[in-house]
Image (cartoon, coloured by chain):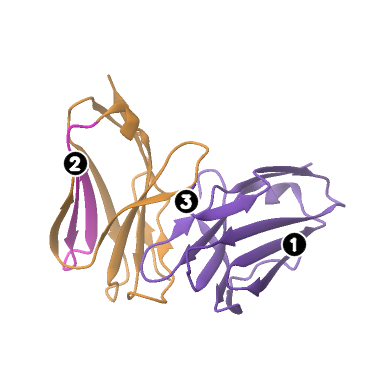
Chain colours: A orange, B purple
């Protein structure tokens, strides 16, 4: 049984701070890692994906992957109230046709 | 709009009704999916279609019946649902890695 674990939160951070969202996974064969953002009442939206160990930066977002420790994280710098949402971690075994396993999501609240 | 369109956005149906959810994508993706999202639970994969062929049925009750007439359209036919089937039903499509989700159908069974 492949599992993806996330702390459900809520994680509350002040505006301008760094929000750190963490995800662990059970399948050592996992190859592809995704972060989705889901606003309340909306559908998930892909914001980051990472395949290799290390960091990947895109604007205020940084995804960090450590395959040896089986965790992937998402850092949001200079957090804004508009970043308040649920962040879903998803992990799949390989690129292409493999179905990802989703975590329950972490609720992030950025307060002014 | 994400490129994946779902209709209707909201649906209230009785337990004896029959209704259908529709999903349409014009992204050129070759795989389409139905997911169920209930409160406090991870996304639950229901069905997968690759090039119009069903490749996965994740032990979904027969009161949910998918149909994929072509690689751009996906339906979910519903009949004799239960109140616990009330949830957000999400359609997604993919080509390589990463999904594009539709806006979802908020289903309430009364």
SS state under label 3: loop
Determine which quarter of the picture holds residue A9: top left
Report in which chain the residue with disc 2 lies: A
Q: Is residue A10 above or below residue B64?
A: above
- Where does the magenta region start and end? A60-79
Name the residue at 36% across, 68% down: B97
Report in which chain the residue with disc 1 lies: B
Name the residue at the top extreme: A112
Answer whether residue A65 is magenta in the image.
Answer: yes
The residue pinned by badge 2 equals: A60
Between marks 3 and 1 in the image, the one whose residue lies nearer the viewer: 3
Q: Which mark is residue B2?
A: 3
Q: Which mark is residue B77?
A: 1
Between marks 3 and 2 in the image, the one whose residue lies nearer the viewer: 3
Q: Are marks 1 and 2 on the same chain?
A: no
Q: Which comes sooner in the sequence, label 3 or label 1?
A: 3
SS state under label 2: loop
Quarter in which the C terminus of chain B is drawn = top right
Answer whether residue B68 is magenta in the image.
Answer: no
């Amino acid at each position: 049984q492949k599992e993806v674990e996330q702390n459900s939160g809520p994680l509350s951070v002040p505006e301008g701070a760094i929000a750190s969202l963490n995800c662990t996974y059970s399948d050592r064969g996992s190859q592809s890692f995704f972060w989705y953002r889901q606003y309340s009442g909306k559908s998930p939206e892909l914001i980051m994906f990472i395949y290799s160990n290390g960091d990947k930066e895109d604007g205020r977002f940084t995804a960090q992957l450590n395959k040896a420790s089986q965790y992937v994280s998402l850092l949001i710098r200079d957090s804004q109230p508009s970043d308040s949402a649920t962040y879903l971690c998803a992990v799949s075994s390989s690129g292409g046709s493999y179905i990802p396993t989703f975590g329950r999501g972490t609720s992030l609240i950025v307060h002014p | 709009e994400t490129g994946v369109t779902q209709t209707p956005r909201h649906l209230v149906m009785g337990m004896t009704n029959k209704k259908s959810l529709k999903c349409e994508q014009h992204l050129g993706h070759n795989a389409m999916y139905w997911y169920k999202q209930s409160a406090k639970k991870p996304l639950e994969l229901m069905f997968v279609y690759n090039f119009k062929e069903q490749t996965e049925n994740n032990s979904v009750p027969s009161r949910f019946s998918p149909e994929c007439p072509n690689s751009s359209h996906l339906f979910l036919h519903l009949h004799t649902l239960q109140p616990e089937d009330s949830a957000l039903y999400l359609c997604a499509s993919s080509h390589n890695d990463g999904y594009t989700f539709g806006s979802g159908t908020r289903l309430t069974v009364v």
